[in-house]
Image: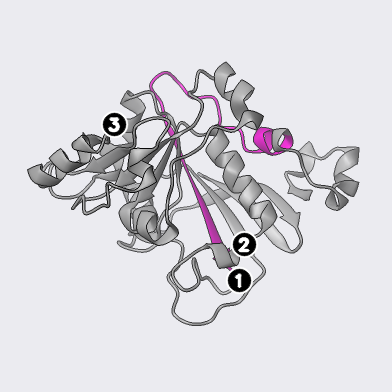
Amino acid sequence: MRRLLPVTDMTADDATAGDREWSLDELADAYAYPALPPGGAWLRANMVSSLDGAGQHEGRSQPLSSDADMRIFGTLRGLADVVVVGAETVRLEGYRPARAREAFAARREAAGQGPAPTIAVVSASLQLDFSLPLFTEPLVPTLILTGAAASAERVMAAEKAGAEVVIAGDGPGVEPARAVAALAERGLRRQLTEGGPRLLGQFVAAGVLDELCLTVSPTMTAGTAQRIAGGPSVAVPQRFSAASVLEEAGFLFTRYRRI
């Protein structure tokens, strides 16, 4: 892996770094969260896209990924307090509980974090399979973000399964800014969303996405696959600035921050 941006951070080793695999410590340093003010939160997204703009192939992101992409995926989880994900993505990608990883144990302890990030599922209907390991085997209870109009019966089923239900909206759905604030109030301030496209689009439209970590996969899919963000459009396109770009085997690992 080699660093393309920022140029000012390059060292003599960067010129030859393309022939070696970066350690998890190096990746963790490259993707460290910024210092946060008291009570503040930072929401970053991690997504992958083909060259022709597909955010998935046959409903899943894995065909667009690579070993290096998965190492960065694991690193971003290893740094996060909470992973926020939409219910449909949980179903399609077969989400399991986040696991504790020895490689990040000391870093997480120093940051005052638990052994693994919490998984927070966004669902208006709570139509989830509560027998899945995500709900029966987590290191920390899985959260479900929903609206105030959610079915009392489904809320009860979720809580019976061991999940914690968090109301983050006055209607049937979740309000993105309320979700970010509700997680921060629980001390989950380093936030990571892995989509899907509709959830990411809602965060973008609400203006609460601080950072996008986008893997550009050197693949073409054609077809009608969804982009990485969908749902409501914004009145004026939001500008992000390039914070870093890494490259390996034709994959570009980019990081953009909201201006």
Q: Mark 2 points at which residue?
A: 216
Q: Name the residue under label 1.
A: 51
Which mark identifies residue 255? none
Q: Does the magenta stretch include residue 48?
A: yes
Is 66 located above or below residue 76 in the figure? Answer: below
Q: How far apart are marks 2 and 3 (CA)?
A: 32 Å
Q: Name the residue under label 3.
A: 182
Q: Position of residue 162 (x, y in %)?
A: 27, 34
Q: Distance between the residues labelled 1 and 3?
A: 36 Å
Q: Does the magenta stretch include residue 12?
A: no
Decide: marks 1, 2 in contact (CB < 8 A)? yes
Residue at disc 2, secondary structure: strand
Q: Position of residue 18 (x, y in %)?
A: 84, 52
| Three-letter amino acid code at the position of disc 2 | Val
| Three-letter amino acid code at the position of disc 3 | Ala
Q: Give the range drawn in magenta.
A: 26-51
69 relative position to 160: left or right: right
Q: Residue at x 69, y 50 (%)?
A: 245
